[in-house]
């Protein structure tokens, strides 16, 4: 079967220490909510949820690609998000699953045609394109990350304007220098 005929499986991750959004390979979404009182144990909770989402290590066939929102560079949240990224990236490397990194502005442009703004346009675009509503913006972002990965792999779930698809070239895809 050629790559053009193959249906790829992608997981989208909007990582956060308090509420990580996951878009699973089947398109469903969820949020891993952790409590501050659990301290660094929250990292283990997120790692376990991601391991279940991606498969591998006795959990079934692993996904083809994970697409994550990249760490914000100039944000108060960068330090805790970097800790979550470290745990998740280590897991993905150990189980051999490639991952891509998409900065928030690129994801917003892909979804809405505009690289800035709040979360409402992302939710409206998800409803317009896929007919879906989400419990929170973490799940919405994770879904858009999954859709971006499927689009990049040539299996888009729906049609996107060419200019918005072009934005995906700005992401860091497997095989590119990190």
Image: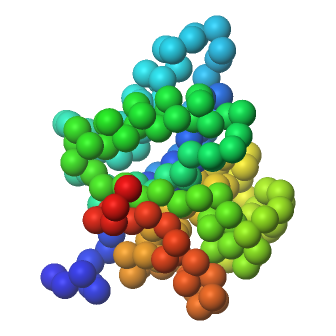
Q: Residue at x 39, y 65 (%)?
A: 173
Quarter of the view holding residue 161: bottom right
| Residue sitting at the far bottom | 162
Q: Is residue 26 visible?
A: no
Whether residue 72 is visible, yes or no, is yes
Quadrant where the C terminus sits is bottom left
Residue 62's place in the image compared with 20, above or below, is below
- Residue 66: horizontal and vertical position, in percent? 40, 55
The quadrant in which residue 175 appears is bottom left
Identify the residue at image location x=61%, y=23%.
Answer: 34
Residue at the (32%, 36%) spot, across then down:
90
Q: What percent of the width, then of the height, locates residue 119?
A: 79, 56
Give the image location of residue 109, x and y in percent.
Answer: 68, 73
So how many labels did they put on this image?
0
- Residue 160 or residue 117, whichever sits in front: 117
Residue 85 or 57: which is nearer the viewer?
85
């Amino acid at each position: 079967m050629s790559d053009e005929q193959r249906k790829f499986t992608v997981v989208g991750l909007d990582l956060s220490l308090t509420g990580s959004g996951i878009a699973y390979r089947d398109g469903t979404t969820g949020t891993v909510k952790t409590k501050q009182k659990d301290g660094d144990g929250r990292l283990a909770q997120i790692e376990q949820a991601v391991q279940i989402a991606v498969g591998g290590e006795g959990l079934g066939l692993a996904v083809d690609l994970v697409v994550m929102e990249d760490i914000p560079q100039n944000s108060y949240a960068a330090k805790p998000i970097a800790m979550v990224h470290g745990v998740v990236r280590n897991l993905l490397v150990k189980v051999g699953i490639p991952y891509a990194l998409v900065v928030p502005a690129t994801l917003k442009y892909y979804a809405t045609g505009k690289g800035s703004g709040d979360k409402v346009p992302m939710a409206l675009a998800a409803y317009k394109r896929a007919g879906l509503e989400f419990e929170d913006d973490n799940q919405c972002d994770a879904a858009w990350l999954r859709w971006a990965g499927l689009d990049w792999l040539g299996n888009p779930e729906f049609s996107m304007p060419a200019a918005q698809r072009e934005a995906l070239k700005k992401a860091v895809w497997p095989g590119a220098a990190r």
